[in-house]
Image (spheres, helix red, strand yellow):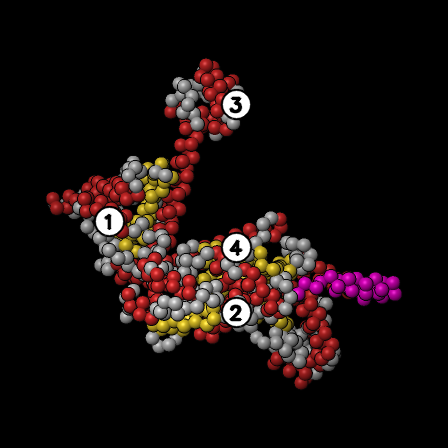
Amino acid sequence: MARSAGSTLSFRPKPGSIPESPGVYRFRDAHGRVIYVGKAKSLRQRLNSYFADFSALHPRTQTMLTTATGVDWTVVGTEVEALQLEYSWIKEFDPRFNVKYRDDKSYPYLAVTMGEDFPRVQVLRGAKRKGTRYFGPYSHAWAIRETVDLLLRVFPVRTCSSGVFKRAGQIGRPCLLGYIDKCSAPCVGRVTPEEHRALAEDFCDFMAGNTGRFIRRLEKEMREAASEQEYERAARLRDDIQALQRALEKQAVVLGEGTDADVVALAEDPLEAAVQVFYVRGGRIRGQRGWVVDKVEESTPGELVEQFLLQMYAEAPPEAMPREVLVPALPPDHEAVAELLTEQRRARVEVRVPQRGDKRSLMETVERNAKESLAQHKIRRAGDLTTRSKALQEIADALDLDQVPLRIECYDVSHLQGENVVASMVVFEDGLARKSEYRRFAVKSKEGDVASIHEVITRRFRRYLEERSATGELAADDGGDGDGEGGHGPIDPETGRPRKFAYPPNLVVVDGAGPQAAAAQRALDELGIDEVSVCGLAKRLEEVWLPGDDQPVIMPRSSEGLYLLQRVRDEAHRFAITYHRSKRSKTVRESALDGVPGLGPARRQALLKHFGSVKRLREATAAEICEVPGIGPSIAEVIVSTLKGESP
């Protein structure tokens, strides 16, 4: 059982015992296992922050502290040494509370097994093998195979398995690729091992971006063959050149020739982050790869970038390292990170944020891919029936509900300094959004978010009671069966469609903490509704609040239940913001005409409808304004003089 917050102080180091030097620290559990590894410029300052205010910590950090029974540290000389030691400890101990980036899918690589006597070209997924050169990753395996098929004309390296290679050598006859000149057939001795390895090395050089010298060499040989009247050989060389050029065309040119960079972009929400990387070699996009990570703490984009770069490049071979890493935000210790990557590559590596030009444009493209990747990850997760069922059950267990909340309604309030207050209601049924059931409210209360929540919940469920009464459900006690014709049931007999507020939810979620949840519960109590449960979801720490409780319900950060509640809350927030912006825009446009004498609401609406915006109305002449129905010459002159006087 997890210990209380107070008991976490039992292993707190004595004041003054923690050095102020840079270093790396480890939290351990009761069994001595390392559960978290971190680094700090000042060990004393960083470790003291864990024990200063337990309630203000991230929920996952709280869980880590209640699991830990001890902490130790190692002092290092520089920030680079801290980065190196932190990574080596994370790799060695695999702490459960450290961020771990995982592939959002298995990407195929083009691999050349240079460690074998006769190197082989093949498509591989999964863990990388020693002695093998990798190129990519690619989005699709078929894209690799098309490229390989073109390159084998010029670099006829073997692609067969070990069994096929051995069998061909035994019978003294190569496979089909050997007969059509797409393999140099080392299995039967057409080329020596040294010659075949040279072909494999040339293949690797071409894939690494050193393309120009091969095309120039073939062009020179083609011209020499033509001058010697060896036209068939010249034609083959011409076809080889075209094959290499087609292979290059499949890789888009995005930056200047010779540019060697990895472009990293992030998309995140409070629970997860998606990372996308485009690999640019020789100015061309050579591959793409994506990761998704569960966020452990309140991390800035720079901190996420730092963790990602360490995990991605810490064991990369020097030839796979780029000269430049373009990132959306600089790591907190970006100079130390750049120095560490430089040591890894054995040549200078620059880490920077692109500000303008082609590199900035490419970064924006990668960011769009990261956002799409995160959205697709959420869709896959939400679309899984088993996962949705697990999420609903976890919510029911955490909130002590009698049944799983098959229908959830979430409410959010949006305003700008108390003006144009609006609220949204979104509906999720069986864990999926029901957008046809979304509703929005123009809030009358000006007394803050708590009063606004009370008003909206009251209005929504008063409508529910009215429509339930209209369907005959309340009349069942008088002999009615609450079903059948005459308007009974939740279907409107006039339209044949469900009544807007006829279905009650199992759970009402409000965006906020205890006060907002209490306001929603008070509104339901005042209406006599006791079959609907209520909770609040606070943004800062993703805490779940029940009405009347002094302490929040802390759901595990990795739980599907919290993930579903967060999705519901974020959707309500998005819907409320959209409505608020549209209403604010309309108010701003109308307010620009408030100062025109003799112009009432109907005429203001007619003018805006005709011209589309105040800007176009300000540019119009009096004659053009007179074309609007209801606007005469005199009022048109007043409009022109008033708006011209207001214009900057």
Depth check, mark 1 against mark 3: the one in front is: 1
Q: Amino acid at mark 4?
A: Ala
Q: Is residue 224 magenta?
A: yes
Taking 441 as reference, is 235 left or right? right
Q: Secondary structure at mark 2?
A: loop
Residue that sits furthest to the right in the current view: 228
Q: Amino acid at mark 2?
A: Gly
Q: CA distance from mark 2 to mark 3?
A: 71 Å
Q: Amino acid at mark 3?
A: Ala
Q: Is residue 519 magenta?
A: no
Residue underneath mark 3:
620
Question: Which badge, 4 or 2, is on the more N-terminal residue?
Answer: 2
Q: Amino acid at mark 1?
A: Ala
Residue 643 image point, x, y percent: 48, 23
Q: Quadrant of residue 195?
A: bottom right
- Residue 143 in view here: no
Local packing at callout 1 (Cα closer than 10 Å; few below 14, some 14-19, many 20+) is: many
Depth check, mark 2 against mark 1: the one in front is: 2
Residue 409 image point, x, y percent: 30, 49
Question: What's the residue at 42%, 65% (across, down)?
Answer: 44
Residue underneath mark 2:
77
Question: Which badge, 1 or 3, is on the more N-terminal residue?
Answer: 1
Residue underneath mark 4:
329
Q: Main secondary structure of the magenta part?
A: helix
**Disc assigned to residue 518:** 1
